[in-house]
Amino acid sequence: MTLLTVWADDEPGTPLRRTEDGEKIAAELGQLGVRFERWPVVEGLPAEPTSEQVLAAYAEQVARVVDTEGYVLVDALSMNPTVDPERAAQARRKFLAEHTHDDAEDRYFARGAGAFYLHIEGHVYAVLCEAGDLLSVPADTRHWFDMGTRPDWVAIRFFHEEDGWVGNFTGSQIAATFPDFDTLVATR
């Protein structure tokens, strides 16, 4: 199940709230301008699906988001530690640094899990996303993403620009002070 954990940004050891209730998660994130939705998971994707296979499986949902939000580039990305462990480790290190984007960051998890940490108004909101979750992080929101020490997921990514993923790194070390993906999963 999806998990939302909230801390004061200077108190990483003391959670203020934790919930696995999807409606409460959507409501709390919605107050911050963050969209959270649940989609039915399509079963039967190959172990290592191509972007085209994932997009075809979710064509109706993807079309709805593109029509509603005006995205011009949509792809699917997968991470599997057994296929390329060094690529997985490099990607994890990159995304663990706090950053922003000039564009919204929309991700749908078709398989597996990952945690988005949103640093907003003196708080950190960790959203442990799992298969079926769509999260939309608004443009210019400080955040980081942790896929764990053994990343294994498939996600659909939506972009307003042809450039795709472009991060503006803040230089903050805040991500290192909060419980990581593996800890969130272990403490559920």
Image: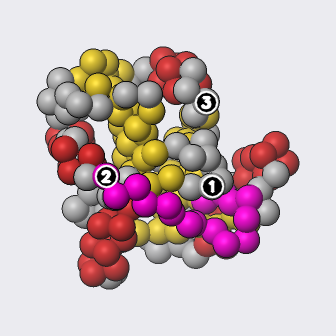
Relative depth, front residue between 102 and 109: 102
Query: Which residue shows up at 50% across the image and 53% down it?
Result: 100
Q: Quadrant of the C terminus?
A: top left
Characterize the local packing of mark 2: few (<14), some (14-19) or many (20 or more) Cα atoms within 10 angstroms: few
Identify the image quadrant of residue 157. bottom right
Q: Which residue is mark 2?
A: 172
Label 3 residue SS: loop
Measure the C-alpha gap from mark 3 to mark 2. Answer: 23 Å
Characterize the local packing of mark 3: few (<14), some (14-19) or many (20 or more) Cα atoms within 10 angstroms: few
Q: Which residue is mark 3?
A: 33
Res 64 visible: no
Residue depth check, mark 3 versus mark 1: number of the one nearer the observer: 1
Measure the C-alpha gap from mark 2 to mark 1. Answer: 18 Å
Measure the C-alpha gap from mark 3 to mark 1. Answer: 15 Å
> Magenta segment range?
157-172
Among numbered discs 3 and 1, the one appearing first in the sequence: 3
**How far across and down, in percent of the image, does residue 153 sit?**
42, 60
12 relative position to 112: left or right: left
Per the image, is 163 magenta? yes
**How far across and down, in percent of the image, does residue 61 sit?**
73, 47
